[in-house]
Image: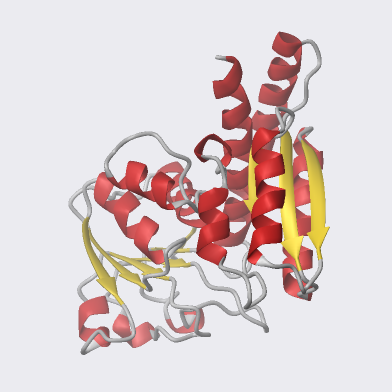
Amino acid sequence: MGALILDGKALAKAVEAQLKERVDSFKEKTGGSIPLLATILVGSDPASATYVKMKGNACARVGIESRRIEMPESTTTEELLEQIDVLNEDDQVFGILLQHPVPDQIDERAAFDRIAIEKDVDGVTCLGFGKMAMGEFAFGSATPAGIMTLLESYNIPIEGKHAVVVGRSPILGKPMAMMLLSKNATVTICHSKTKDLPSIVRTADIVVGAVGKPEFIKGEWIKEGAVVVDAGYHPGNVGDIDLKSVIDHCSAYTPVPGGVGPMTIATLITQTMLSAERRIA
């Protein structure tokens, strides 16, 4: 029997089917109001433009409205903050997404933290991270929250397991570690300064690749029967883990593409819907 494929594409379809029903229910309760996600794209990065388009398409599939705001490459931090303020004040907007990365001259952290906590459906604010880490309600960072949904939907045991997260970015590695910890895993966070990384990864029951380097994590680093989650995506349809050298001895894995990516978008629109529901509750 081969390794279990954690099929994010299939699960995202199921999530979208449920969201359609929730959108219809919301419209009935509000006399026809439609939840709206505003996306801000600064500059002309083609990959970012593609991601924003994919998110807009997902909104359309479930009946959520999307508003795309494009700002020039020369945008200043102050101009971006002003645009976020406008969206914070707009009662029609239930979620705000600032597409990462922004041009170098912009203070991205200041921009993320300007997003109102109740509209932070991508889970990027310091306040949201702090609340989540302390066990209070906040919208989780979309990729790690999507990974948690994927693990739980496939009944992957987390409690008592040793999870190793390779990567410590503020919107992926760190929140991923906190979410696993909240489900009672024992968590190790590894990074570029970690000594003897392979030996640490070999102790993991769950490995999360979130390092941003193509096929950085090798198959021989991963022990027999581990669960492998690859949160990376790079040209050539490869992730952060050398999956072809892992599949023969892991118990479950996320494919690239079709694993974590679809769940990121599904989580974003799910949290937009939840934001709308919380406002009328």
Figure coloring: secondary structure
Left or right of 56, for residue 78: left
Q: Residue at x 58, y 21 (%)?
A: 279
- Give the number of marks: 0
Left or right of 217, for residue 81: right
Can residue 64 be seen by looking at this rendering?
yes
Can residue 142 be seen by looking at this rendering?
no
Residue 71: x, y in percent?
80, 62
Position of the C terminus by quadrant: top right
Does residue 151 sit above or below 101 in this rendering? above
Position of the N terminus by quadrant: bottom left
Residue 183: x, y in percent?
27, 45
Which quadrant holds residue 116? top right
Which quadrant holds residue 45? bottom right
Q: Residue at x 70, y 10 (%)?
A: 29
Query: In the displayed image of the protein, which residue is found farthest to the bottom?
Result: 196
Does residue 218 sit above or below 125 in this rendering? below
Q: Residue at x 50, y 62 (%)?
A: 109
Residue 67: x, y in percent?
81, 44
Residue 169: x, y in percent?
42, 69
Q: Residue at x 23, y 61 (%)?
A: 187
Left or right of 29, for residue 216: left
